[in-house]
Image: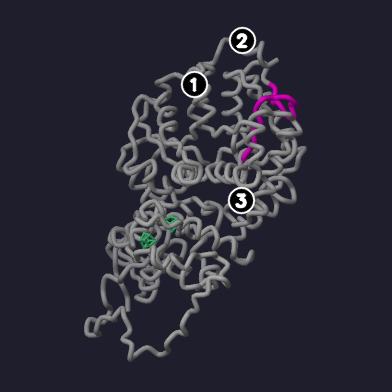
Amino acid sequence: MIYETKVNDLAEEFGVHRNTIRNWINSGILPAQEGPGRRYLIQWEDYRRLCDKYGREPRFNPDPAAPEESPVTPRSQAATTPAPVRLDVKTRNLDISPGLADICLTCGSCAGACPISGVDELDPRKIVRMAFLGLEDELVTSSWPWKCTLCGKCEAVCPMNIEIVQLLRRIRAQSDRDNVPAAIRKGVVTCLEKGNNLGIPKDDFLALAREMGEELARTSCPGFVTPIDARGARLLVTINSKQPFVEPEAMTWWWKIFYAAGESWTISSEFWEGINWGLHAGDYGAMRTMVKRIIDNIERLNCTALLLPECGHAYYATRYALERWFPESLQQFKVYSVFDLLLEYLDQNRIRLDPASQTKLTTFHDSCNYGRHSLKSFGHGYFKEARILTRACCPHYVDLIPDQEENYCCGAGGGAWADHFEAERVFHGRVKARQISASGAKLVVTSCFNCRDQILYSLNREFNLHVEVQFLWELVANALIMPPAETTEARHV
Ligand code: SF4
Ligand code: SF4
């Protein structure tokens, strides 16, 4: 049986952009032949498989004479009755309270809010129920916890405040390491063995950091020298290994801000990595080790403050680890998120910004980790700060609807940007793409590498968004009104 349809009709049916349908066809996710009149011919089984994957009921029945399949198998027809599940909490690894069954209303609000619910039968309500019923093996061997971006949208709408993200993190942690997506597993192992996720040799990194500093001194910051292992500097700064690997100029946005603010700062020559994929992998031992290395660097270099790593997950992982395993260190040095530090510079007039450096209509995309998760775990989400800083550079500003605590994930969180579930990542991102498109914004500002990459490189292409995307610190660096050369030279030479 052949299903004949148009790309636009399929896009509407699955709630995605027509580019996504074309990508499914071109990549073989949806085998289809071109037919007459810009139509596609699809085998019924392939169409049915796609419907199953994305949790859609097929729009038509290939055999109108055949009765509709009943979604419920009558008891009398059930081939076998599953064995009863023993509710013995002591033998459970997921550490689920038996009271969960009474607390969860099975209302489905979580499933309704989840942008990926229904895909490959993933459903947060089902996950909660399975956890309670003790179906741990089924959960830890499934791909659901890895297709889920841990965005917490489900948790935010749960009327009973059930910690669904915490449950999903526990499922990741209990998973056999072979079940962890290969890219994430490799990143963790490489970081533990070589000091950074991408295995960049120390000499290469140092040479590049010095070279980028010399370039900055030539172009905009006279006298600038990259401060590596500067003992006694106030602020320790980590580096996201993606920067030296693929876009080294991105490191210099912060360096330019530090230069203008007259900051005393340094990078460590060892263990400078800011990324922490221990969080994504559910490997808390690795996460702790990576954060301990940062603490050791602060002590070795005698710094008194730490700029928490920039990327949303890395900020969250580092802050979480400091509070959980190294609470005494929070008495020894000050921690800044990127928002805290930029706002401090602005409030203390250490930097001046051109209020109209961007004339495009601009919006801000809230990272789940800086927003919802930070609010829940640390008592403060960085919503207001993001808008103050963005508006300080952009006179034409519009919010996404919904945003802040109710914001939708870009689709690339929880390691999804790195793992191999690309079709699911794009599908998840369709909601974010619609939000951006509806806002009319031409510039999206964000504070996370994965959000930036997903919107810039993936959603732009899939959904014809045509938007520019900048990091918050990139926006600020571009809006800087640089202080007179004599004052900065005096500070930095
Ligand atoms: S929203 Fe909360 S109470 Fe409702 S089904 Fe989901 S977990 Fe249960
Ligand atoms: S993708 Fe987000 S909303 Fe869906 S289950 Fe995961 S955390 Fe919940």
Tag 2, which secondary structure?
helix
Residue type beneath disc 3: Trp
Q: Main secondary structure of the magenta part?
A: loop
> Reading the chain from its start, which is encountered first: label 2 or label 1?
1
In this orientation, which residue lies closer to the viewer: 40 or 307?
307
Q: What residue is pinned by disc 1?
A: 346
Query: Circles 2 and 1: CB distance less than 8 Å?
Result: no
Q: Position of residue 484 (x, y in %)?
A: 57, 10
In the picture, the disc for residue 75 is none
* Image depth: mark 2 or mark 1 in front: 1
Tag 1, which secondary structure?
helix
Q: Quadrant of the C terminus?
A: top right
* Residue at x 51%, y 66% (from the top left corner): 143
- Magenta segment boundaries in residue numbering: 225-240
Q: What residue is pinned by disc 3?
A: 277
In the picture, the disc for residue 487 is 2
Image region (quadrant) for ligand 2: bottom left
Q: Is residue 452 left or right of residue 64?
A: right
Q: Is residue 476 above or below residue 169?
A: above
Q: Is residue 60 above or below residue 309?
A: below
Residue type beneath disc 1: Leu
Q: Is residue 327 above or below residue 127?
A: above
Q: Position of residue 6 (x, y in %)?
A: 29, 62
What is the C-alpha distance between the residues marked 2 and 1?
Answer: 18 Å
Q: Is residue 32 above or below residue 285?
A: below
Is 491 colored magenta in this rendering? no
Q: Residue farthest to the left?
A: 65
Q: Position of residue 151 (x, y in %)?
A: 45, 51
Residue type beneath disc 2: Thr
What is the C-alpha distance between the residues marked 3 and 1?
Answer: 32 Å
